[in-house]
Amino acid sequence: MNRFSSGIHPVREALRGGRPLDKVLIAKGASGPRLQEIIDLCRERNVPVRFEPREALDRLSKSAPHQGVIAFGAARQYAELNDVVEGAKLLVILDGVEDPHNLGAIIRTAHAAGANAVILPERRAAPLTETVEKAAAGALEYLPVARVTNVNQTIERLKQSGFWIYGLDERGSELYDQVEFSTPAAIVLGGEGKGLHQAVQTHCDVLVRIPMAGAVSSLNVSVAAGIVLFEWRRKNAGAATHVSAGQSARK
C-alpha cells in the first residue's frame, strides 16, 4: 500500500510542498473553499482527483480523521514527458498494467534492456508504490517513469518526434523476431488479460506477436516485455539509428 495523508491541512501542505502524489480522493458530496483549493492545487500539479463514497475513505484512512480528503503518495517522483523523450532511443509505454509486481518487473527489465524511460497513463495503471519499488529491485533509481493523461495522444506526439511505435499483441501480423526495429522506438505493452486497447492498436505503426507453442495463448506481460525488449537490444546494439525496409514512410 502506498503512503497516504488524510485531512485537509496535511493534504494541502503536501500539494504546496511539491510532494510526489499518485492521486487524491475526495468524498462525494463534500464541498467548501478549502476542498476547492485542494482540487485547484491538484489541477496545477497534474495530480489525478477521484470522488469516492465517504465510506470508502473511512476504510482507506483506517479510522483516522480525513475530513473528506485523502492523498496517496508515490514512492518516486514522476518524470516529465518532455525530459524523457529528448535523446531517447527506446521508450516503453504501458497501456493498462495494473499489477504492481508486473510494473516493477517491467521497469527492472526495461532498464536492463537499455530503455530510456517507462511511460504510464494516469488511469487504469498501477502507481509507483513501495511494492513497485521493491519489485523493480533498484531500477527506479536509474530509470525515469513518466505519467501521461492520454496514451494515444502521447503516441502521436512521439511519432512527430521520429519514433516508430511497436505494439505487442497476440493478434499482431508480424513476429517479434522478424521485425527490423527502428530507432528511436517505443514499444507498447497492454494490460493483464486484456492486451492493448483497440484505440491504442490503431495508433501503432506495427503490431508484433510472440509465437506460442503451447495451449496458452499469451504470456505474463512482464515476461513478454523481456522477450521483446531484449530482441530490440539485440538488433540495435549501439542504438544505431536506421529505418527498416518498408518503413521509409508512414501510411
Image: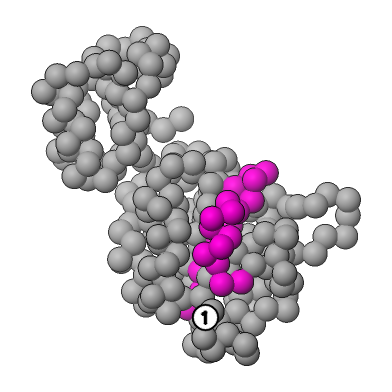
Query: Which residue is pictured at 29% across the width and 23% down the height?
Result: 26
Q: Which is nearer the eye, 20 or 198?
A: 198
Query: Which residue is pictured at 35% across the width and 30% down the height?
Result: 50
User: Can residue 140 be seen?
Assistant: no
| 10 magenta-colored | no
Q: Which residue is mark 1?
A: 250
Query: Which residue is pictured at 34% across the width and 25% down the height?
Result: 51
Answer above or below: position of 187 versus 104. below
In this picture, which residue range is highlighted in magenta? 184-206
Answer above or below: position of 65 versus 152. above
Query: Which residue is pictured at 40% across the width and 53% down the height?
Result: 150
Picture coordinates of residue 29, whole percent (x, y): 27, 15
Estimate how packed mark 1 is, as few (under 14), some (14 to 19) or many (20 or more) residues with alpha carbons within 10 Å: few
Q: Which is nearer the eye, 130 or 115?
A: 115
Q: Which is nearer the eye, 201 or 24?
A: 201
Q: Is residue 39 left or right of residue 131?
A: left
Query: Which picture quadrant has residue 187?
Result: bottom right
Answer above or below: position of 249 versus 102. below
Q: What is the residue that sits farthest to the front in this orientation?
A: 251
Picture coordinates of residue 5, whole percent (x, y): 29, 26
Query: Which picture quadrant has residue 98?
Result: top right
| 200 magenta-colored | yes
Picture coordinates of residue 195, whole percent (x, y): 64, 51
Picture coordinates of residue 159, whole percent (x, y): 43, 73
Q: Is residue 208 left or right of residue 28?
A: right
